[in-house]
Image: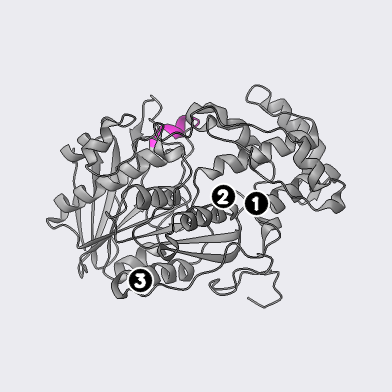
């Protein structure tokens, strides 16, 4: 096991990212490119990226202009590289200024003792970066992640034969954005619990639903008092009032309908989705495109509200004029689905933070683009956000690699179908309390 400490300022990264937020990024990349939502002007500071390599691998780590990175290469390297994109890191509070770099795993930053171990055991090198700012920044995250390929080549002394792109949550958004905007740069993409532009639409829809049910419009100005009032009106999961049950039903039914572990997943997101909706105006770039104008709300009508009445009365937030034009920031525009290389997504049924509704939106876009053969989607019966098992992650990755090497498209699930008993094929293992009646 060998560890190499490297502090690098890579010229190519400076070319790629110093102009982030302007159209010159496209020319610097030399491909389709992205124009990212710019970072907030804050005193960002990179944490110590040093780490111990796994047995039979070497660790490289250091700084690039704007952030920190980690690279791990097995001694029996097979010549391929996995670029890993981490998820959202809250940029609020003192800790929000710290730029952190993690390991390949199904969650946010994590310890990497699952997916990472599998990559090294199979001979894959991996690289991950902090990004140059925290917050919801998939565009900046994509450019920083792409720049890792140059760092890897300079560190390793040899360019990879193939490069795979993967990530979780916002990192999943980064993966899909990268596969769309740089259509031939990667061998394939694996997006775990991927967010996307539709996430802001979902949160906006929940905020408007809560406003109609409770009569309280939660804003940044009345956040503390408003939150206390909403808790009084709704109760707290699992003990909800009548109005609380109405809001719970709207969130579940509108985000994909009844499905395994949906109620359990909502427990941690019930009121948080409302408060997250109130936070969207903090970034004008996202607020300008967030809309519930086309959302068709659904609700279990036994809770005292009718679907038709709800859709008629709920406040609709339109998109700001021209906000979804291609002259704006690419990452806020709905996916166009124009994938040229294999893409697989995996999603949990009980994810009420980034709901499975976004998988349906992606499917619509890919179908409309005529790229159905480039997308495989899988569903797992799990509560919460990104709670995949090691087996689920590694099987998905191995199947993507086989897809690339052998040309055989793997099997997936139909995310457009009834999801009440979805996820039986690829869930491994069944979780305790699985509502399907089978013992885990």
Report crowding for label 3: few under 14, some 14 to 19, many 20 or more residues within 10 A (C-alpha): some
Dot placed on the residue nearer the N-terminal end, 1 or 3: 1
Quarter of the image that includes the N terminus: bottom left
Q: Is residue 267 left or right of residue 246?
A: left
Mark 1 = which residue? 255
Element at label 2: loop
Report crowding for label 2: few under 14, some 14 to 19, many 20 or more residues within 10 A (C-alpha): many
Disc 3 + disc 2, Cβ < 8 Å: no
Disc 2 + disc 1, Cβ < 8 Å: no
| Magenta-drawn segment | 92-98
Q: Position of residue 126 (x, y in %)?
A: 29, 58
Task: Give the CA separation, mark 1 to mark 3.
Answer: 30 Å
Q: Position of residue 22 (x, y in %)?
A: 31, 29
Q: Is residue 381 left or right of residue 186?
A: right
Judge whether 20 appears above or below 351 on screen. above
Q: How many marks?
A: 3
Mark 2 = which residue? 354
Residue name at image x 19 percent, y 48 percent = 150
Task: Give the CA separation, mark 3 to mark 2.
Answer: 27 Å
Mark 3 = which residue? 403
Element at label 3: helix
Task: Give the CA separation, mark 2 to mark 1.
Answer: 9 Å
């Amino acid at each position: 096991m060998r560890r190499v400490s490297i502090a690098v300022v890579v010229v190519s990264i400076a070319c790629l990212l110093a102009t982030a937020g302007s159209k010159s990024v496209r020319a610097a990349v030399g491909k389709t490119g992205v124009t990212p939502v710019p970072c907030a002007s804050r005193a960002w500071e990179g944490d110590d990226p040093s780490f111990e390599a796994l047995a039979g691998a070497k660790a490289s780590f250091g700084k690039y202009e704007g952030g920190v990175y980690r690279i791990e290469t097995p001694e029996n390297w097979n010549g391929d590289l996995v670029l890993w994109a981490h998820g959202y890191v809250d940029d609020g509070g003192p800790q929000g200024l710290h730029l952190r770099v993690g390991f390949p795993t199904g969650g946010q930053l994590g310890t990497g003792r699952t997916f990472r171990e599998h990559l090294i055991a199979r001979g894959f090198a991996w690289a991950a970066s902090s990004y140059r700012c925290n917050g919801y920044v998939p565009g900046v995250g994509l450019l920083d992640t792409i720049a890792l390929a140059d760092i890897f080549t300079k560190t390793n002394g040899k360019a990879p034969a193939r490069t795979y792109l993967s990530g979780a949550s916002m990192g999943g958004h980064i993966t899909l954005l990268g596969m769309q905007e740089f259509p031939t740069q990667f061998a394939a993409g694996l997006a775990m619990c991927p967010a996307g532009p539709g996430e802001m639409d979902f949160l906006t829809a929940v905020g408007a639903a809560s406003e109609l049910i409770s009569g309280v419009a939660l804003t940044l100005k009345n956040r503390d008092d408003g939150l206390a009032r909403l808790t009084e009106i709704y109760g707290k999961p699992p003990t909800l009032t009548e109005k609380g049950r109405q809001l719970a039903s709207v969130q579940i039914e509108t985000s994909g309908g009844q499905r395994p572990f949906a109620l359990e997943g909502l427990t941690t997101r019930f009121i948080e989705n409302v408060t997250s909706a109130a936070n969207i105006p903090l970034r004008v770039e996202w607020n300008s495109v967030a809309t519930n104008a086309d959302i068709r709300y659904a609700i279990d009508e036994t809770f005292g509200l009718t679907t038709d009445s709800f859709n008629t009365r709920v406040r609709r937030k339109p998109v700001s004029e021209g906000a979804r034009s291609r002259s704006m920031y690419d990452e806020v525009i709905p996916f166009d689905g124009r994938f040229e290389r294999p893409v697989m997504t995996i999603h949990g049924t009980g994810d009420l933070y980034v709901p499975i509704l976004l998988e349906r939106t992606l499917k619509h876009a890919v179908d409309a683009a005529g790229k159905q053969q480039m997308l495989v989607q899988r569903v797992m019966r799990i509560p919460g956000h990104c709670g995949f098992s090691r087996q689920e992650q590694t099987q998905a990755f191995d199947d993507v690699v086989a897809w690339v090497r052998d040309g055989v498209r793997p099997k997936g699930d139909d995310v457009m179908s009834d999801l009440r008993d979805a996820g039986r094929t690829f869930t491994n293992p069944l979780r305790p309390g699985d509502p399907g009646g089978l013992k885990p």
